[in-house]
Structure formats: C-alpha cells, structure tokens
Image (cartoon, grey):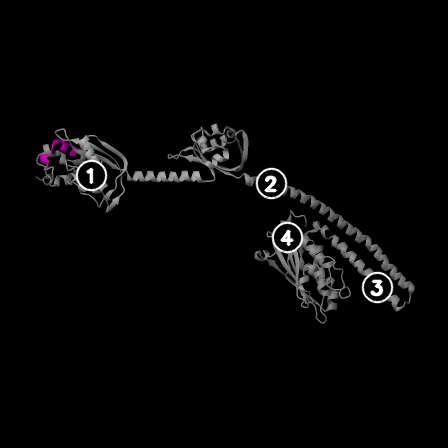
Amino acid sequence: MDLRRPQDNQFFHFIQGGGEMGALTRSFNWSQTPIGPPEQWQQSLRTTLGIVLHSAFPMFLFWGDDLICFYNDAFRPSLGADGKHPALGKKGVEVWPEIWDFIGPLLSKVMTSGEPVWFEDKLVPFFRNGKIEDIYWTFSYSPVYDDSGKVNGVFVTCTETTQKVMIFNRLQESERRFQNLVTDTTVGIIVLIGKDMVVEIVNDAYGQLVGRSREELLGNPLFSVIPETEPHFRNVLDGVRTSGEPIYLSEHPYFVLVDGERKEGFLNLVYQPYRGDDGQVHGVMILCQDVTPQVVAKLKMEEIVAERTQELATANRHLQRSNAELAQFAYIASHDLQEPVRKVATFTQMLEAELGSTTDRQRSYLDKIKNASSRMLLLIRDVLTFSQLARDSDLVTQVDLGIVLDNIVDDLELLIDQKQASVVYDGLPVVEAVPLQMSQLFGNLISNALKFTRSGVDPVISVSAAKLDKAALKSYPMLDARCAYHHLQVSDNGIGFEQLYAEQIFEIFQRLHGKKEFEGTGIGLAMCKKILQNHHGHIYATSTEGQGATFHILIPENQACFADSSTL
C-alpha cells in the first residue's frame, strides 16, 4: 500500500501531514518490520503516533517488544547532521547502542511496571555530528497502552538543555571563582543586601578587621553584629545603595568593640553598588584594606618632620640674626678701622716731610709703612664691600651686561693700554640683577685677568654668552630647572692654575700666589661667588697652569621664579 496517498482517510488520517517525519512515515515499508503495515496497527498506536507527528514539541515513541522507533520533526534536530537520522522503523537497541545500558533498563521498567520516569538536565551523551557529544536532556518516559490494555510502548517527551546547562555551569564556575577570590584575598570583602544590610558574602579578612567570624556575620544584618559602626557608616551605605554611585574613602578611621575592648585603625574603603541580574542595585559591596601601620608611620613621620621644621626654622632665625650681626660688625669694624689706617698713612707722610733727607734704610722703613697701610686700607674697603653685598635686594632691575662691560673697559682703559691687552665681547644678554653687583662681578674677573698675565704675552680676554638649554641644565643640580639661565664665559690667556685649586680660589682670603708676585687681598673671587649666590646662580672655573683660565658664570635670566626665596 502507498502510504503517501492513503486510500482510507478513516484509518490513515493520522499519517497525513506531520512534515518531514510524516512523509518518511508514509513512505516507509512497514511490512518488513515486526509491527506490520499500518492497516494492521492497533488504534492506540495510530492515536499516539498521530499525536507525536503533529506536535511541535520534541517527541519520540518506542513501540512493541522490539521498541520500534518513531519521532517527529521537532525531535529531528537533536539527532544532528551526521548521526542517527533516519532512525525511523529501527529497533531501539540498534539506534541507541552507546546509551542502551542507561535507557534500556528505564524502558524495561516503564514497560513492565507502567510507572513513568522523569529526568532534568541529565547528561546522556550519544553519537551525532560525526562524534560522541555530551548532551543534556530534560525528558520523561510514559507508558502507552495498546487496545488490550497492556503496556506496549513508551512515549518520550524531551527537550535538549545542553546550552542551558553549559551556561549554568559557566555561571557556577564563575561564582566559584568569585567565592574563592573573595575567600582567599587579603582585602576585606563583604556584600550587604537590602535596607537591613544583610550579609550575603563575607571573607575571613573582613572578619579579622572587625573581630568577628564569618559565621557570626553571614545571614545577619551587619549593624546587629557590629552596632557601634552604624553611626559612622550607615549614611555612606544608604547613599551608595540609593544613588548607585561608588564612594572611595582613603585612610578612614574606624573602631569596633571586641570582647568589650576598643579596636581601632585606618582603612582604605571602596563602596561599590551591588547589582542583581535585573541590573538594579540590590545592595553594596565593600572592599576594605587595613592601612593602619602605614598611616601610623606617616603620622609619626609628619610629627618628626614638623619637629625638625621647627628646629630648622629656629636655627635659621638664629643664623640670620648671627649673619646680620656679623655683617653689621664687619661693616662697623671696616668703617672704623679705616680712620686709624688713614692716620698711619698721614703721619707717615708727615714724618717723611719732617725728616727731609733720609738714609736708604730710613726710606726703606718708611716705604714699608706706606705700602702696608695702603694694603690694609684696600683690605678694609674690600671687607666692607663684601659685607654690603646682601644689602641690595631692592635694587634689582634689567641689566644689559654689554653696557656693564663697556663701562668696565672704560674704567680700566689705562691698565689695558699699559698691558697692551685686548678685551673682546659681543652679544651679551640682558638679565634681571643688581647693576652695581654685576659691575663688581665682571670688574673683579677682568681685573684678575689683567693681573695674572704671562710675561712676554699680550693678554687677550674674551667674554661670551649662550642660553643654557634644558639638557645642559640637568648637569647643574644646584640650579632651578624651572628657570632660564645664561652661560657666560670669561676666558684669558694668562698664567692659569692647577685644576685642583678650582674651588679653593673662591674662598675668602685664599691666594695661590704671594703678595710680592701679584697684589691683592684674596677677597675678589669670594665676592664673585657671593654675588652669584645672591642672584641664584653659580660660578666655577676651569684652567690648565700656564695656559690661561676660564670662569663660567651661570645666571638666571630673571628673578621672578625665586619670589619665595630668602635671597634676591
């Protein structure tokens, strides 16, 4: 009989429709199976198969002692692209050999007892898509009675839940990792739910901070366990829960009562809104890091720094007073000492005039007195000048160093001509400085270059300038990197000096040569150093003995960035 065109709709209406599996059922040669052709099928089989084929829910039917297989279009995708399909009309043990040890006893139990069975998310791996796959099912096996009232089949309703189970497993794994992270971390973590702040998650680290065990905290409102913290933290928690915005507190003080004793410290706190699957804020997650040792150490350090600052301020006041007194003493002493020296010089001249003609020895004595008094007077004047260097802070203005050099060369014109010297300079900058001190600075340097000359060599003195770039500025840690500096070089071809004396020459009263060789008081370069210190600059020298010397001047373009300094 051709089931694709049934002749008797009264008997074969259950075969009509049913999609792909309905067509396969109609075209299948059932006469070659133990259940025979459809016109011989019992009414119970026809009715049950009609339900299966016309259902949109996955269904499977085992029939007869051989458990012949029927299924519908909804079940078809579960068999995969390369697997058991078509399994229609085959014996159950032939279709499901890899899982027969599991489903065989279940089918036998239903067939013999008439009791249904049901499983949820059960792992039932079988062959499909060219391989054995792990597949999860929720299914039921129900007895089907034949026309005689005997259980002759098993009706299967099922749905594959593999994807749901995999998602659930991933969520469980994520939850497990989160719980492990919370449990193992050294940062205190607690999750509070609802208005009552019920503890849903908490780790041992948090318990140690508040002196409570996890068991005491879990499932209880937080402030029922540690009520002493409510006045300090309730408003913060309510704010995060209602606004959905996190709050961060750094080095926040806290205390709890543990066995009646106060435990206190400092915490870094993060209050994070805790959202549910619906995206709504259901509570607050708190992360607590104990920073008590660090804060205590910092407070102690601040206390020490405050004490040291006070001590330094006191010492600085004493030093400033001592410096002022010393400068005042130097000024008064130098001023008062000039008068006796002048008298010595005057009475020496009067004595020389009174004596008239003198012997060579007498003249020698008189010359020594005059020379000594002249040097003493020069020394006193230099000390007086040195003591006054710090008194000119109100005289800072724009100074053209080119004009300063013009004036110095003009003042030293006679000496320059006598020495047959040349002084070369060009392109010198304009800087913010005390004009008189700039004249003293370059006057001393040019005078020294004219003084320490080599015999038989015409002196050549050059002054050059260049802007100090950022890279070069890093080589001078004593300078302020915020400011712009000029690098001036005063070079000569005189006698020079050994480099090991490069620092000594800037100390007051330090001389490398005897008074008979070269005149001077030993104060000139000390004055240059003091002038550069007043202007937040620096001076140093480079030289090779017998080949001249170069004095390097590093001076700021302006004094604006030193407004908070105690000098200019």
Can you say which quadrant of the picture contains the N terminus?
A: top left
Residue picked out by circle 3: 368
Q: Nearer the viewer, mark 1 or mark 4?
A: 1
Answer with mark 1 or mark 4, whichever residue precedes in sequence. Answer: 1
- As measured in the structure, the alpha-carbon distance from the residue carrying label 1 to the one carrying label 4 is 92 Å
Residue 499 in the figure: left or right of residue 332: left
Residue 195 in the figure: left or right of residue 298: left
Report the front residue among 202 and 412: 202
Q: Main secondary structure of the magenta part?
A: helix
Q: Residue 50: within the magenta? A: yes
CB under 8 Å between callouts 3 and 4? no
Answer with mark 2 or mark 1, whichever residue precedes in sequence. Answer: 1
Q: Amino acid at mark 4?
A: Asn
Residue picked out by circle 1: 73
Q: Quadrant of residue 102?
A: top left
Answer with mark 2 or mark 4, whichever residue precedes in sequence. Answer: 2
Magenta residue span = 38-51
Residue picked out by circle 2: 300
